[in-house]
Image (cartoon, rainbow, N blue to C red):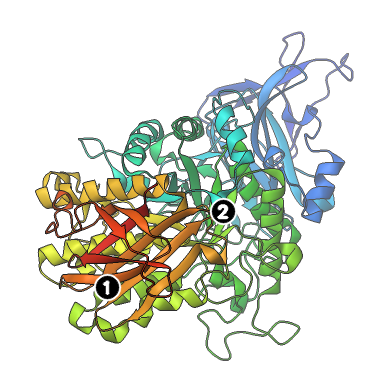
Amino acid sequence: MRPGDGEAVPMESMGNGLWVAAVPGHAAGDPYRLRFRFADGADWERDDPYRFLPTLGELDLHLINEGSHERLWEVLGAHPRRLDGVAGVAFAVWAPNARSVRVVGDFDRWDGRLFPMRSLGASGVWELFVPGIGQGELYKYEVLGADGKMRIKADPFSFSQQVRPETASRVWGIGSDEGWTDDAWMAARAAADPYRAAMAVYEVHLGSWMRNPDGSWLGYRQAGERLAEHCHRFGFTHVELLPVAEHPFDGSWGYQVTGYYAPTARFGTPDDFRAMVDALHNAGIGVILDWVPAHFPNDEFALREFDGTALYEHADPMRGQHPDWGTLIFDYGRPEVRNFLVANALFWLDRFHVDGLRVDAVASMLYLDYSRETGEWQPNQFGGNENLEAIAFLREVNEKAYGRYPGIMTIAEESTAFPGVTRPTYLGGLGFGFKWDMGWMHDTLAYFHEDPVHRRYHHNRLTFRGLYMNTEHFVLPLSHDEVVHGKGSLLGKVPGDEWQRFANLRCLLANMYTQPGKKLLFMGTELAPWTEWNHDAPLAWELADDPQRDAFGRFLEDLGRLYAATPALWAADPEPGSFLWIDASDVESSVFSYIRRAGEQLAVVVQNLTPVPRYDYRLGVPAPGRWREALNSDSEHYGGSNVGNLGTLEASDQAWHGQSASLTLTLPPLATLILLPEG
């Protein structure tokens, strides 16, 4: 020990890790520092961490145990601070069943004996202020568990971590609101109605979207600049990022999270991630994150048995272990665990200004018997298979997210017919803003997989959606899940020779863009590759030089522009009257025709899904007069055969298909026409 006068006073070991000394003439408040000499002769000196008061107040501890601390990230984790004029880092971690917790890092030579943390009683929180360290320090917690086993754990609230395979947490301050330049975006977002806006989402895996020439990853800042330009080209309004929270295994694509509060260090720092979001906002592009509260991996360094007990995971294997993925399931009924997840959702919306969260694997959370056979699950207290605690958790997330961050959206990946996914919680729903329409995706891909000669027997796959399209607010997804694990690419799913495959793919996308609901396309769709997605390599951008794919890219550009410029295709999505079949029964010809309407805005869509041109095809339309062929997917500009209607048509007042007027059309082979009234 070195008192304020500079004279060193040796301390005496008590044999249990404690050292004591009496310094004559010194009183409370007098300055002193601690000096350590290690076995290898190295010296180390700094302020005594135990002279600083705990940084968590009684209210914080009460809210943590109650499970209602909405800004939990501000009090748990590692925070650079200045206390009593001394710079350092305040560490705090929840480990209620631990016998002891010690903070270790480069600053104490990873020797847990130097910095035992203080228990804050029944709260289960352990706390310590370590002076003399700051931003960028690596650290972990040495946790002596209730079972007597010592575990070295990453911080559940770390804001930055090492790049895999290393697993240490890194001190990083994220409390400042300085540096943002997206005020105009945030104000416009708060005033917008996402249900009545055009929304086309570009789903991106940052590690394999685009890379540097040497094969290294793009940084967040580089990716932001290039994504903004790319989205503008194709008319995408939002980027949806596969999970960017820290994860050790590249092959999980981010869905096995070990650092829920840390943007992955693969692509840069938390500041770099924030700069990417800011740049995209300034370019007019929204940012949606994939969020994974359904499960977490069983890596020893992370959440598993954090304090020697089933702490974050449910203790009952029937509810705490996922049979499909070999992962662990959160204990949604534990207030502190629920708080960890709710606060995490708010954290991304607050600290990084993200515009939405797409919640992964919601169905696996809703049902106690998800992927379980009889005898492998137990019903809830009412005898049902619903996971009531998970349902309450999802409602809480949605209520707090929408209540505190105007204009955001939450999107459920939910593959069952669970009622009220996008109904408000006050009406008994889950409170999500949108739900992926997995039914549309499965039915549409199944239909387009059929050879056109057989499509007459599968006509109802494209008409069935009309029975339920207004039961929820939907996103129509053609996501990463459809182009992996042997499923092939979209181009590989459709039949025919190369010409027919591209024609089918154009029709598939035209069907998506003209149906009610928001749109989501996985990256690479614009390149129409033959092979499925490979997460270990960048997209094959050289394909864009192929003439057929160059033409396909022009089609997707024009489809995106037309969608954005045509309110009839999106402005009344929530209203039943926004979609009306003209003829859903032309089974023999495999022709589908429908009207999209928003107020006085109209669009008519006709799809001929066989390779046979159809001449003099009479089609009912809502009004006589001139109609413009706003898009013909068979145009030679897009690689088609250039059959069509020469751009404009005149509708007569002859009633047809229950409409007051009609057109006589030429329907190109395997093609979609989008017709708009003129005048």
User: What number of labels is visible?
Assistant: 2
Q: Nearer the viewer, residue 555 or 309?
A: 555
What is the quadrant of the N terminus in the image? top right
Q: Position of residue 497 (x, y in %)?
A: 10, 68
Let me know if residue 311 appears in the view.
no
Left or right of residue 85: residue 241: left
Give the mark nearest the N terminus, 1 or 2.
2
Q: Position of residue 37 (x, y in %)?
A: 59, 26
Left or right of residue 255: residue 663: left
Mark 1 nearby-residue class (10 Å; few <14, some 14–19, many ≥20): many
**Residue at mark 2:** 195
Which three-letter amino acid code belongs to the residue tagged 2? Answer: Tyr
At a point 80% along the width and 54% down the height, the residue shown is 65
Which three-letter amino acid code belongs to the residue tagged 1? Answer: Phe
At a point 60% along the width and 47% down the height, the residue shown is 193
Q: Position of residue 368 (x, y in %)?
A: 61, 79
Q: Nearer the viewer, residue 367 or 427?
A: 427
Note whether 47 is above or below 311 in the view shown.
above
The residue furthest front is: 653
At a point 44% along the width and 44% down the height, the residue shown is 237
Q: Position of residue 291 (x, y in %)?
A: 53, 54
Mark 2 nearby-residue class (10 Å; few <14, some 14–19, many ≥20): many
When asked about the image quadrant of residue 593, the answer is bottom left
Q: Secondary structure at mark 2?
A: helix
The residue furthest bottom is: 374
Disc 1 to disc 2, C-alpha distance: 28 Å
Indicate which disc residue 500 carries: none
Let me know if residue 562 appears in the view.
yes
**Residue at mark 1:** 448
Note whether 26 is above or below 229 in the view shown.
above
